[in-house]
Amino acid sequence: MSRQTLFVDVIVPVPMRQTFTYRVPLDMNDKVAPGKRVVVAFGKKRNYTGLIRRVHENPPEVYKAKYIDAVLDESPIVYDWQFAFWEWMAHYYMCGIGEVMNAAIPSGLKLNSEQYLVRHPDSEVNYDELNDKEYLIAEAIEIQQRIKLDDVQAILGIKTIQPIVKSLIDKRVVVMEDELRARYKPKFETFVHLNSRYENEADLNDLLDQLQSNNRSVKQLEVLLAFLHFKEQVAPQRVVKRELLEFSGGSSSSLNTLIKKDVLVLEEDVVNRIQDMDNELNMIKALSEAQEKAKNEIKEGFDDNKPVLLHGVTSSGKTEIYVSLIQEVIDKGEQVLFMIPEIALTTQLIRRLQNYFGDRIGIFHSKFGQNERVEVWQRSMSEGDDRFDILVGARSSLFLPFRNLGLIIIDEEHENTFKQYDPAPRYHARDAAMVLAHEHQANVLMGTATPSIESYWLAEEGKYHLVEINKRYGDVKMPEILCADLKKEQREKTMHSHFSSFLVKQIEEAIEAKEQIILFQNRRGYTPMWVCNECGWVPQCVRCDVSLTYHKQAHLLNCHYCGYAIHPPRKCDGCGSTELEMKGFGTEKIEDEIKVIFPNISVSRLDLDTTRSKHSYQRIIESFSNREIDVLIGTQMVSKGLDFDNVSLVGVLSADQMLNYPDFRSFERAYQLMSQVAGRAGRNKKRGKVIIQTYQPDHWIIQQVIDSNYKKMYQQELFERKNFSYPPFFRMIQFTVKHRDKEMARRNAELLASKLTEVFKNRILGPQDPMVARVNNLYIKQIILKLERELSNKKVRNIIWDILKDLESDKDFKSSRIMIDVDPT
Ligand code: ADP
Ligand code: ZN
Ligand code: ZN
C-alpha cells in the first residue's frame, strides 16, 4: 500500500460547473482511479455517488478536503474520453458537469439516496450468506416492503451504505424500486386462453349461438368475439388479458363471467421482455446502381474527413445504404452508433436492422428498465464476445461507453427530437455527435429526405460533404401532390365538416381499389377549444396560460402542458350562456367524422392518446400493415419512417395550422412534415397521391411541397433567415426566467436583459412573453441573444457566466429560476 496522500477530483451530481476535491484515506489509495464511482458527502448531504475525474496529490487551496467514504467499483465504468466529451458539452451548452453526468449515466449506476429498495421478486435469499449489516436491511425490507436509501443509513447507523446496498443487489436480495417497476412487473402477465373444450368448431358455434340467444349475455358475446378476433389477428401466440380488455373496450366483469363459466381460462406466466427475434438473419440486399454510387460518394466524404449529409428522397433506399456501410464497419471490428429520433416510433426500422444483424445490436431505450440499460452500457464497453457492435438509440445513446467507434449514423437528422429541452444539458444530439466522432476519429453520416436548413447550409459551405439521391428505389414514382382549396369549397358549400369533397372523393376511390389511406392532423384530442358563442370565452388551464383541449373518449378538457384536467363546463364562465361551440379539430374528431362519412370501413388512430400502453403503437402499426385497417389517422407519428406497401393516398387535413405557427422554423417544419407524410404514399409500384387541404394553395411552401423542390424551399427560407438574422447565419442563446410571482419574473428578466445589453448591445431581444407565458404556476419571460457565427464561443460564455455570477448577490434575482438554452429549436 502506498503511503502517499492522494486527492481526487470528483464530479458530483449537482448543477455546479466545477468538480470537487476530496482526500483519499490511505487504505483506499490502491482503489481510486478515474472513472470509478465514489461515495462522498456534499453540502449538507452525505451519500452522493460521484465519479472520480482525476487522481492527484494537490490539496485544494481554499477549503479543507473531506475524505471520500467509499470506492464502489473494481474497474472504471466511464472511459477517459467520455470526460472530455462531457466537459465539452457542459461548456458549450452552459450547464454543470454534474448535470451532464446525470444525463449520461443510466440511473441504475447511480444509487441515488432518494430511491427506494424493495425485495427482489425472484429472491431466494439464503440468510446465512448475508453478513450482519446485510441481514438487517433484508429483514427491514421483509417487514416494511420498501425502504429509502436514506433510511438504510439510519437503520445501520453508518454513513456509507452504498457498498452494502451494492452487495445486496449483486446477491439478488433487493432491487431498486424504479427498476422493479420498469423491469420486473411486466415479467408476469395474465394470459387468456379458450377452454380446450371449445377448440372444436362445432362446439364453439354452439356456445356462440347460446350466448347470442340470451339478452343478458350480449356483453359476454362481445368480449368472446373480441377475444377470438384478437387471438386470430393480433396475438396468435398468447392473448394478454390487459391488452384484450384494452382492445375490446369491454369490461372485466363480462370477461370474469366467461371465466366463471369456464369458457375462458386464465393463466399467470412469465413473459420474455424482449421479443424473440427470428433466428434466420436476412441477407443484405445488393445495392442498386444509384445506391452504389451514393455509397461511394459517401465514402469519398469520409476519406475527406468530413461529415456526410445524405439527402435522399423518401424511399430512395437510404436505409439499405446504411446497412451496407454498417456491415463494412463491423467487419473491421469497429462499432457503429445508429441514432434515431425516437425508439417508440421506429420499431419498423429497428426490426429491419435486427433482421440483418441479430444480436450484435444493442438497443438503448429510456423506456427499458435500469438493468437492461446497464446491460447495454456494459456490453458496449465489454472486451469479450458479448460486446455490441451496433448500438441503436435516441439522443441519449450518444453517452454510451464506446470502445472502438467507427461510424455514427444519424437518421432523419432534421428531427427536433434530437434536441433535449429539459432538464440540462440542453444538447442537440446531431451537433454533439460531431464532437463525439472527432474524439474517436469516427465518420458521421446524416440521412434525411428533408435536411434541416442548418445542415444543408453547412454542406453548401463545404463543412459537410453532400450526397444526393433524387429517385426512389426501383424507379417508383414520387407521389402526385394536389391541393384541396378550402376557401373555394367553403364558398361553394361542398365541405363535409372538415373534409373537402375533393378529399372525400379520393378516399372513396382508394377504398374501392382496396388500398389504404393515411390522414394526417397535427393535433391530438377532439377539438382544441370550447368557445362561448356569445362572448368568446374559452376554458383555460388554471396553472398555465393556455386553453384546454377536449378529449372525447375521456370526456375531459386537458392541458397539454401540465396535465390538468376538468369536466367540460355546461355554461360559459364569462357570460353564463350555454351556447358553447367546439372550434378547431384534432385527430379524435377526424376519426369520428370519417366514421360518419364512411360507416363501413375500419379506422384507427395513432397519436399520444392511443399509444400510451407499452405495445399499443406496435399493435396499431402491425394491424395497419396487415391491412386490417383501411384508414389510419394520426399526428406527426404517422410521418415518421413508416414503410407500408399498400398506402396509395395521404391526406393532410390542415396545412394552415402548421404554416401559421409563430416560430422562425415553422415554414421549414411545415415543409418537412408535409413532405415526410407525403412520402408514406405509393412506396410500391403504383404512383401514390397526396391531398393537402389548405386555405392558401398558393403559399410558397405548399408550392414547393407539391414540386418536391427542397432546394427552392431552402433558398427562399435561407434568404428570410439572413434578412432577419436567424440561424444558420446567427447562433442563438435563449434565457428563460421563471418565477412564481409575475412581477418578480418581469423585474428579474428585465434586470438580466439590461446587464446583457450592456455588453451585447442590440444582439439582445426581449424580455418577452413566450407563446405560453405561464406553465404550472410559474411565470415565464424569455430573452434571446443572437450572435454572429464568427464570435468566440468561449468569450461569449465567460461573459454570460460573469454576468450571472454578479447577479447572484441580488437576493430577489436569486429567487428566480434561470434556464439557458444554446441553439434553441
Ligand atoms: P428510405 O430509407 O430512403 O426511405 P428504404 O431503405 O426504406 O428507403 O427503401 C424503400 C423500399 O425499397 C424498402 O421497402 C426497401 O426494402 C426497398 N429497397 C431499397 N433498396 C433496395 C435494394 N437494394 N434491393 C431491394 N429492395 C430495396
Ligand atoms: Zn396546464
Ligand atoms: Zn360567454
Image: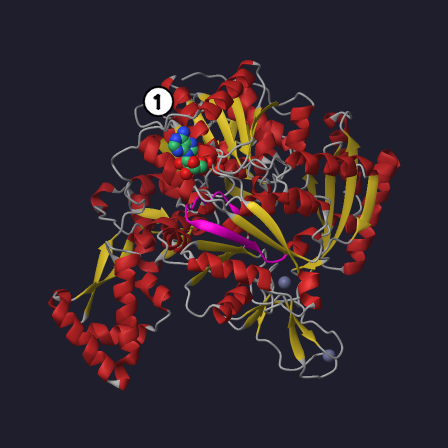
In this picture, residue 625 sits left or right of residue 681: left
Q: As displayed, is residue 109 above or below residue 462? A: below
Instruction: Say what amino acid the circle numbered 1 marks.
Output: Glu
Q: Looking at the rendering, which quadrant does residue 201 occupy? A: bottom left
Q: Quadrant of ligand 2?
A: bottom right
Task: Name the residue at the bottom extreme.
Answer: 215
Residue 184 place in picture, x, y as percent: 32, 51
According to the picture, the residue beneath numbered tag 1 turns out to be: 383
Residue 603 place in picture, x, y as percent: 44, 62
Q: Quadrant of the N terminus?
A: top left
Residue 693 place in picture, x, y as percent: 63, 57
The residue shown at (29%, 61%) is: 230
Q: Which residues fall within the magenta stretch?
A: 639-654
Residue 30 place in picture, x, y as percent: 42, 21
Give the class, few, some or many, for how many residues have Cα within 10 Å of label 1's Cα (few <14, many ≥20).
few
In this picture, residue 707 sits left or right of residue 269: right
The residue shown at (61%, 43%) is: 672
